[in-house]
Image: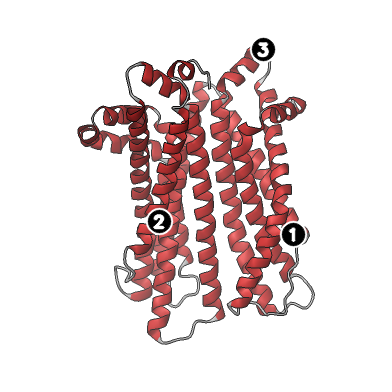
Amino acid sequence: MFTLALRSVRQRPGRLLATLLSAFLGAAIVMTFGSLQDTAGAPGVDDVSAETLRVSSNVVGGYGALLVFFAVASALTVNVRQRSAEITLLRNTGATPAQIKRMVVGEAVLVGLAAALLAIGPAMLGGRVLLGLFQDSGQVADRVDFAFGPVALGMGFAVTLLASVGAAFLAVRRATKAAGARAGRGRIKKAAGIAALVGGTGAIASTFTMKASAPALMAAPAYGAILLSVGFAIFSPALLRGLLKVFERPITALAGASGYLTVHTMRHRAAQLSGLLMPLVLFTGTATAALYMQAVQTDAIRASGLTRSVEDKNVETVNLVVVGIIVVFACVMIINTLYAETSYRRAEFGRQRLAGATPGQVLRTVGLEGVVLTVTGVFFGTAAGLTGLLAFTAVRTDSVLPEPGPGVWLLVVAAATASTLLTGLSTARRALRTPAVAAASATA
């Protein structure tokens, strides 16, 4: 089956392009921060510089590994779901579920290896730039030279391949399981969502047990906001259906036929759309919490009249880099998933046009879907981020509300909205160029 996987990738490389892009960005980020470990372990590096480099590498490297898995899993899940007819044909011709798993996992291994190899050059460049930022801020000595060695390569290849193999295995296992097994998986998913919500609530509550001057004060509410975002994302299909039920009449009244079609289409495709809500919720919640917490921390230090220490600068740099990583990955996940999902709906668009819908109505439907998705993702992401932020602000400043205004939040919302609407509408417009009869007869 590995030979079949090799031929499959060779014959249709474009099908795995989204997975390759996700794995490439993940490998580049993991190798970039892995190179900080190589640099810290080089001869002649002082203890302060080495500690700064190692802490940054460990913290961001952990986030990077998790986000690589989410990004690759999102792309592979869409890819495998769209190949349901191919998988069914293989099953009907005698292939066993184990053989199909080996084929899909083999494809993922090939894509992961290619992505890791392509990421070496950009990772070396990114590592040098990152070291320069640390040196410019005074956190690392100027005499420290950049090193790119076995730690960076080992982390990059290991994380990328493990994420690719694990995500591929879960995606194809989901596609080949029977209905009873899917019900069991649903219970496991529900338990994971509840655990994330309980863990996030507990982490945020623990903030109130810490001192305002504690160096790790920001960690508990930040991790809590991330866990709450993950919990909301896991339950996103049910949350989306609930919101559609509440706002069905207003959407239909404002948008007419396009609104009616949007509500019923999204209600039917809530499970598939959850793949888009996950990065939206995670992006909004994490970016809102981290950026505002850092602003509150900076204002508190400035108000106290103290000079920021190396540790304060290190925490700020790590927070901003983590948010930057999440922004990049969330945007890639949103664009990849939305592009693949919208492209796959070419036949659906063709049938709608044959049933009497105009291209303009189809585009308005796609646009309304993007608006509803964005509003849902931003709402629950903001709720998660705000919960962690309010706890941090109350302990750090003895005030309930943070002083920074809504400007940062509006930028976060604008980025999420632009990623969703521009990708969805541009992909749908491209799909509508195909004649309705030809599009309706397409299988995928």
Numbered circle sitting on residue 151:
1
- Picture coordinates of residue 233, whole percent (x, y): 43, 44
| Residue 289 on image: x %, y % | 41, 61
- Choose between 97 and 112: the one closer to the eye: 112
**SS at badge 3:** loop
Above or below, comparing residue 406 to residue 19 in the picture: below
Local packing at callout 2 (Cα closer than 10 Å; few below 14, some 14-19, many 20+) is some
Q: Look at the numbered disc 2 and give the secondary structure of its residue.
A: helix
Q: Is residue 281 above or below residue 324?
A: above
- Please name the residue that numbered disc 2 is placed on: 412
Between 341 and 95, the residue placed more toward the observer is 341
Looking at numbered disc 3 in the image, what kind of residue is underneath it? Thr
Q: Looking at the rendering, in which quadrant would you find the N terminus?
A: top right
Q: Are marks 2 and 1 in contact (CB under 8 Å)?
A: no
Question: Which amino acid does the dot numbered 1 rest on?
Answer: Val
Work out whether residue 221 can be spotted: no
Q: Which residue is labeled 3 in the image?
A: 93
Q: Residues within 10 Å of mark 3 (few under 14, many from 20)?
A: few
Residue in view at x 63 percent, y 39 percent: 166
Quarter of the view holding residue 29: bottom right
Q: Is residue 340 visible?
A: yes
Residue 61: percent from left, percent from top: 62, 58
